[in-house]
Amino acid sequence: MHEFRKRPRHAPRPQAIDGFFSGPNQQQTPIAPEQTHHSFIGNRLRPSGGGAKKQRRLDDFARPSGYHVVSPQLKHEHEPEVIRPQKHAVDGMFVSQSSPAPNAIPRPTPGIPQQSLLHMTLPGGPLEPVKKSKRKRKLKEPLTKWGKVRRWSLRSASAVAVIALLMGGFLFAKGFFSVHRVFKGGGSAAALQANVTPDLLNGEGSGRVNILLLGKGGGDHEGPDLTDTLLVLSVDPVNKTASMLSIPRDLWVTPPGFGAMKINAVYANEKYHDLSIDSKNTAKAETDGINLAEKVVSNILGIPINYYGMIDFAAFQQAVDTVGGVDINVPAADAVLDYMYNEDTHKPYTLNVQPGQNHFDGLRALMYVRSRHASARGDFDRTERQRLFITALSQKVLSAGTYTNPVKISQLLSNFGGNVSTDFSVNDMLRFMQIAKGIGTSNITSIGLADPPNNYVVTDNINGISIVRPTAGVGVYSDIQNFVRNTLKDPYIAKEAAKIEVLNGTVTPGLAATKADALKSFGYNVTAVASAPTSDYGTTQIIDLTGGKKPFTQHYLEQRYGVKATTKLPDPKVQAQGADFVVILGQDAASTN
């Protein structure tokens, strides 16, 4: 315990080096009286006292904490000089000259007492941390109110720009994948091209763009793959007009490979047939089902189908909500009061649409286009309401507030996702939208096969099943085809309006009248039907008397009869009677009558 005895009052204290006390045999060097301790009082350095009794050790910690200013003259006279490195700039980067490192510990000099590491790092010490020189900033005057607003605006604008870039990238990526889920490609229509030439068109009617629109329940709805909505949207890109034609869902048909059924079951039956063979190949089953539906519709109407669009109830409802709903001035004939059942909420739903201006959100719109029990004509009235609503919805989608809004377009594509499919390619759809934007609501006509005075279908009952059939009889579509072709005329035939004379150059009676009726059904302007001076024509002849001024009509006639047109009448006895084209029917036409 003798180590802890009180030392003599004047006994020398051990000196500390780097925070450790030296041993008893180490030489202790007293500090010169002139090296008195200075403390920082106010803004001046003052000695804390004179005389030997007030001398303190260099490592004495009885001083205020923090950095302390040490005047140069207070340094130990033997303290080695530390050379600060001089810096010079190279391309904006500071590099050090070949000089001692700024924090290098100086080598000890024999016979000279050394300071502790603590004091060496104090201000003025050899290891004082080197601070980077900073330019003295001019004190800024306080910002005015306008200055604060301006600075806030700049920061806000920068933030908005960053958010816009991030959202743009997100929407692009999201839209890219959504677009390719919806627009599968595979359909084609020469009429969509910007510059259409006659050689691009396959026949009468190919100057239009015909799209079969199919609506199904989907999800957990009863009969999810029954296409209860069948519409053909036919667009005339030349004259900027469009027509919507409804096909009754109960129309009795006999598709290839199946027995008789309602047309709304064609897609589902073909799809399920494929899945019964290969349950994993859903894509093929879907495609085959749609292809068969297109073939049946094309056969009934007598027009080509270029594209299809399939949508289910969920996508339809979400699409209406995404565009902010649809406003329609409902005619009195399309008003409806129906007590329905909401299959999603499993609750009753009252649909009350009065004549006049009505706003439809997604649910109300879905119920409106599905209702068919509240009117005397049932499904015929329902198809009329569907055409009315789809016209209004298409105009809303094509409005500047929707198709120029990337957020709404992204939402539409997301809503569509797996609930919408089409064989439009992305490029074809962009071209189609460009054409559709130029078609006003007044240029869209609504066509029904049972809307007076068009009475081409009627209701009937077969084996206890309520059906719809052509007025001419089950499977007899000639009247329907003539009506549709005349209503949906090829735009190039209508535009050129060529006068055509048809002559019978064979012994087959009534051949000219029969062929003339066929031409009329496609919209040709037949001005005369007669017999040729002779009846010995083996091959049909087409004489163009316009000098090539009506190339589309010439091209269509050449395709129809399989011959090239000439410019000179074969017999001077043939009277053109002001016609642009003279068609003399030969025996080849009689054999294919």
Image (spheres, grey):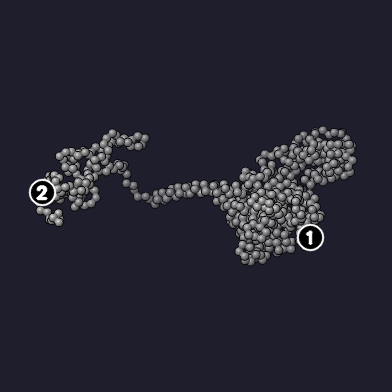
Point out the tag, 1 or 2, that comes first from the N-terminus.
2
Q: Crowding near pointer 1: few (<14 within 10 Å), some, many (20+)? A: few
Q: Position of residue 405 (x, y in %)?
A: 56, 50
Q: Nearer the viewer, residue 382 or 275?
A: 275
- Residue 163 locus on image (x, y percent): 48, 49
Return the residue nearer the eye: 142 or 529: 529
- Asked if residue 438 can be seen in this view, the reply is no
Q: What residue appears at the point 73 percent right and 61 percent down from the top-left corner? A: 378
Element type at mark 1? strand
Helix, strand or loop status at disc 2: helix
230 left or right of 499 in image: left
The residue located at (66%, 41%) in the rendering is 193
Q: Which residue carries the number 1 mark? A: 462
- What is the CA distance from the residue labelled 1 to the residue labelled 2? 130 Å
Front in this rendered view, residue 148 or 158: 158
Pinpoint residue 414: horizontal percent, then vertical percent: 57, 52
Three-letter amino acid code at the position of disc 1: Ile
Q: Is residue 97 above or below residue 36?
A: above
Amino acid under label 2?
Ala
Q: In the shown orientation, is residue 281 left or right of residue 99?
A: right
Image quarter where the C terminus lies is: top right
User: Closer to the observer: label 1 or label 2?
Assistant: 1
Residue at x-position 82% and y-position 36%: 541
Q: Is residue 201 left or right of residue 102?
A: right
| Residue 508 quadrant | top right
Tag count in the figure?
2
Q: Residues within 10 Å of mark 2 (few under 14, many from 20)?
A: few
Kindly identify the residue that appears in the image at 80 percent across and 34 percent down. Answer: 566
Query: Mark 2 — residue?
Result: 52
Residue 561 location, quadrant = top right
